[in-house]
Amino acid sequence: MANIVVSGIRPTGNLHLGNYFGALKSFVRMQEENECFFFIADYHSLTTHPTPGDLHGNVKTVLVEFLACGLDPEKATLYIQSDLPETAELYLLLNMNAYIGELERCTSFKDKIRTQPQNVNAGLLTYPTLMAADIIIHKAHKVPVGKDQEQHLEMTRTFANRFNRIYNVEYFPEPVAYNFGENLVKIPGLDGSLKMSKSDNETSAIFLADAPEVIRKKIMRAVTDTGQPDPSKPRSQGVENLFSLMRYFSDAFTLETFKSAYATGQIRYGDMKKQLAEDVIRFTTPFREKMLALAADESYLSKVARMGAEKAHASAAKTVREVREIIGFKHF
Ligand code: ADP
Ligand code: TRP
């Protein structure tokens, strides 16, 4: 039997190269061999109180970008979390056996208390129960997530096992992290940081949707080092990052050329950046073109969303019906 795989992405803006290589590319591969449910986590995004317009716009952006990256609505179930209200019911039921103490100990919650003390809402506290509901509603076996989500996945296992134990059933499988071959991929940032990220610094990230001139500008401004290149010293993190990016986007000959220029102290970072920018643009252009076409095709997007909601509903409604029975809800 094929594994059931579930993963969600919060609609917080455009996808950058890190998201593509670290997640989307693997999702595209997974949809070939597993029964995949990929969704846009818009209930989760309410913890930050987006305006109605922003919320819808962000969901559309992610849907368009998922499709442009190659997620195939015929192969995977591609849906929007809020189109599946069964998730909210399972979340409510799981919350009855989720303890305040364990939720308060969650690292992501503690981080939020520190970073946004003015908005510590109950949705943040129960973020892990909602995430658990997302996962076990499809009785998932595997969840492809980054390292920062490991604790949430651990809590999902706790809630699933606890349900089984309380009701003395073997109903929910224990979901484990999906270790895809490339889970060690880490795309570095243009600002000298080890990980490209949209949250750290706007200028760190290159988005798949960036226009060529934007990409050129960002790369030309990337951090390198000061003074003359000195091959006897280890490369600065900024320079190291440019070489890493070249490994992904440039051909082997180009990379070798700049490596030997570095080794002889003759490298010109301006030339290297120009070359890298053109290579990145060559990579992103087909994605960008697909995005522009998809974004203009509202009827296709609505068909995809409807189809995903229907498929997700078939799986979720069955789970919630069975869970209600196990709990002891009965119709008169
Ligand atoms: P961001 O750090 O920009 O907010 P998210 O935390 O929303 O990105 O990440 C969404 C997905 O993309 C996760 O699976 C994460 O592991 C992956 N990802 C994000 N940045 C990178 C990166 N620089 N390299 C590899 N994978 C990344
Ligand atoms: N919490 C995840 C993140 O911030 C997003 C998410 C929500 C998710 N529900 C999920 C991921 C279920 C995997 C499975 O990245």
Image (tube, helix red, strand yellow):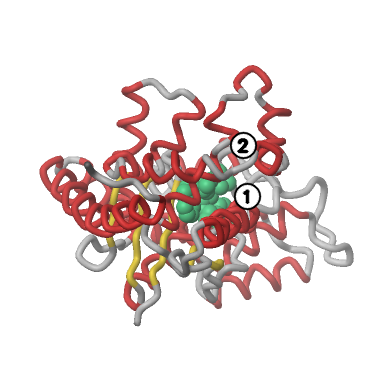
Question: Could you say which quadrant of the image residue 86 lies in?
Answer: top left
Q: Name the amino acid, label 2.
A: Asn
Q: Find disc 2 in the rendering and name its residue.
A: 201
Find residue 309 and report its horizontal and vertical position in percent: 22, 49
Whether the residue carrying mark 1 lies under 8 Å from ligand 1 is answered with: yes
Residue 320 shows up from this direction: yes
Percent from the top left, x then y, of residue 73?
Answer: 23, 60
Which of the pair 122/159 is nearer the observer? Answer: 159
Q: Is residue 240 left or right of residue 11?
A: right
What quarter of the picture does the C terminus occupy? top left
Instruction: In this rendered view, identify the residue nearer to me: 223 or 149.
Output: 149
What SS does tag 1 mark? Answer: loop
Say which residue appears at 37% left-offset and 41% top-offset: 89
Gap in angstroms between the C-alphas marked 2 and 1:
9 Å
Q: Neighbour class for label 1 at 10 Å: few (<14), some, many (≥20)? A: many
Q: Nearer the viewer, residue 75 or 332?
A: 332
Residue linked to disc 1: 189
Labels in figure, total: 2
Kindly give the residue lying farthest to the bottom in the view shown: 1
- Secondary structure of the residue carrying tag 2 is loop
Residue 115's place in the image compared with 205, above or below, is above
Query: On the rendered structure, is 277 left or right of 56?
Result: right
The residue under the point 52% across, 31% down is 123
Amino acid type shown at disc 1? Gly
Identify the mark nearer the N-term, 2 or 1: 1
